[in-house]
Amino acid sequence: VLKISENTPSSLAIMENANVLARYASICQQ
């Protein structure tokens, strides 16, 4: 998981984190 600093919140990093969390959630629900 990418760490997002307060100074430079990369949109790509935020989306990547969201994708990882969504994938993890879907795996846990199966």
Image (spheres, grey):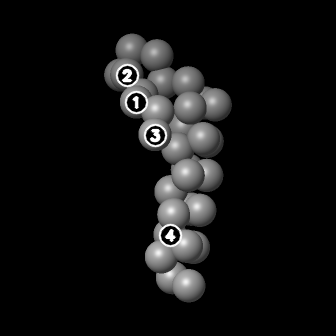
Residue 7 coordinates in the image, percent (x, y): 39, 14
Q: Which residue is mark 4?
A: 25
Q: Mark 2 highlights which residue?
A: 5
Vertical placement of residue 8 versus 15, above or below: above
Q: Residue furthest top?
A: 7
Residue drawn at the location 51% of the way across and 63% of the way down:
24
Q: Earlier in the sequence, mark 4 or mark 2?
A: 2
Residue type, label 1: Lys
On screen, residue 4 versus residue 16, left or right, reads: left
Around disc 3, counting alpha carbons within 10 Å, would you say few (fewer than 14), some (14 to 19), or many (20 or more)? few
Residue drawn at x 37%, y 22% as measured from the top left: 5
Secondary structure type for disc 4: helix
Circle 2 sits in a helix, a strand or a loop, which is it?
loop
Q: Which residue is mark 3?
A: 1
What residue would you read off at disc 1? 3
Relative to 16, does residue 4 appear above or below in the rendering? above
